[in-house]
Amino acid sequence: MLKVALKMLEVIEEAGFQAYIVGGFVRDHLLGIHSNDVDIATNATPKDLKKIFQEACLSNDDYGSVTVIFKNIHFEITTFRKELSYKDNRRPDQISYINNLEEDLRRRDFTINTICMNQKGEIIDLLHGCDDLNKKILRSVSDPFQELEEDVLRILRAVRFATTLQFQLEETLEQAIKEKKYLLCHLSMNRKKEELDKIFSSPFAISGVDLLKKLGLDQELGFTKIYKVKLCSQMIGIWTMLEVDDLYPFTKNEKALMQQIREVLSDPISPLNLYYYGLYPCVVAGELNGIEKKKVNEIYLQLPIHNRNDLAVQTKDILEVLGVSPGPFLKKMYQKLEEGVLTGKLVNEKDALLSYCTQVFKEDMNE
């Protein structure tokens, strides 16, 4: 990835422009973290880039952003710019192209995201981001009170970076977040969820939850149940505990899964729960109950049946022994067979199951 990115810088420079890899990729490279997200900053304008890369797509010409596929890899290229004013506490509504790398870097959010790499692979650190990287400190490039007011998403980005990288918030930045947290109401629920997903899917998710509480962001985010959250390696488990299904934009499948996890939470290793709800909801519920995934897996594998086809009888066998035609009673009959086998009351053998079917059918007929 780095080799291809450096080659792209070379192509841009050969056309007479400056170009640098900037932001998250360089930060992660210095931290030894694998990354596929490469952003390039250049003094070439979008029109210049279209001449250099004829297949370039002007993904957002208003913000000087161009997407280029180079050697089958997507790159986001932005022109050095200055953001003159903001709208809706989120995006600039006016920009101007400039020819100064340092001034372009000063519009970015945190110092650790301003570190650059040139075409030779050399680190360019104009705003001392490497110092903060070594100290594990997250610091705003300029006045954090103003920065957060200009772009409120930076509040959740700060929590995300502090969580995923295990960095400390610089004191002034922390104070600014607490003071400006009310601005989160201007952020769409989709954007909130995107950042929160990254926090909750981190190996350090629980420290992210603790940081949200420490900063007082729980109320602004609608997390009235945040104090119920327990350590969970699965992002869906944290969302399940927060109980914000109707507040955030979850898919139908996500909502169904969270409901399933809640329904098996009282006994995630019950054979009936494992059979009817499946392994994954029970694994997540098990983790929330302090039950190891290995144990849940072992109990699941030991189930006498895992689906209806594992029963030793088929529909034709049941109909033949009862001497009847298919009907609604079959669904109830199968459920009794499944529950009997799973609880150990029935042996999964053809004769035993058919004998039980005959007994149940006669009882139902006499009612």
Image (spheres, rainbow, N blue to C red):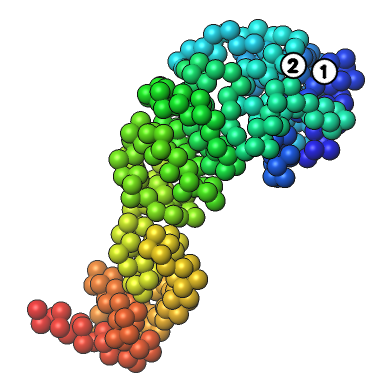
**Dot 2: few (<14), some (14–19), or many (≥20) neighbours within 10 Å?**
some
As drawn, is 242 to the left or to the right of 205? left
Residue farthest toward the left in the current orientation of the protein: 367
Amino acid residing under circle 2: Leu
Q: In terms of depth relative to the viewer, which is nearer, 257 or 266?
A: 266
Q: Which mark is residue 18?
A: 1
Looking at the image, which residue is at 41% across and 34% down?
A: 215
Q: Earlier in the sequence, mark 1 or mark 2?
A: 1
Q: Quadrant of residue 309?
A: bottom left
Looking at the image, which residue is at 46% across and 49% down?
A: 206
Looking at the image, which residue is at 71% across and 32% down?
A: 130
**Dot 1: few (<14), some (14–19), or many (≥20) neighbours within 10 Å?**
many
Secondary structure under badge 2? helix
Residue 228 place in picture, x, y as percent = 33, 50
Relative to 213, residue 187 above or below: above
Residue designated by label 2: 101
Residue 328 place in picture, x, y as percent = 24, 68
As drawn, is 73 to the left or to the right of 180? right
Q: Tell me if residue 325 can be seen.
A: no
Secondary structure under badge 1? loop
Q: Tell me if residue 239 can be seen.
A: yes
Residue 1 place in picture, x, y as percent = 78, 40
Amino acid residing under circle 1: Gln
Distance from Cα at disc 1 to Cα at disc 2: 9 Å
Q: Do callouts 1 and 2 mark residues in contact (Cβ within 8 Å)? A: yes
Residue 263 place in picture, x, y as percent = 30, 59
Looking at the image, which residue is at 70% across and 26% down?
A: 128
Q: Quadrant of residue 283?
A: bottom left
Relative to 114, residue 136 above or below: below
Q: Quadrant of the C terminus?
A: bottom left
Relative to 34, residue 321 above or below: below
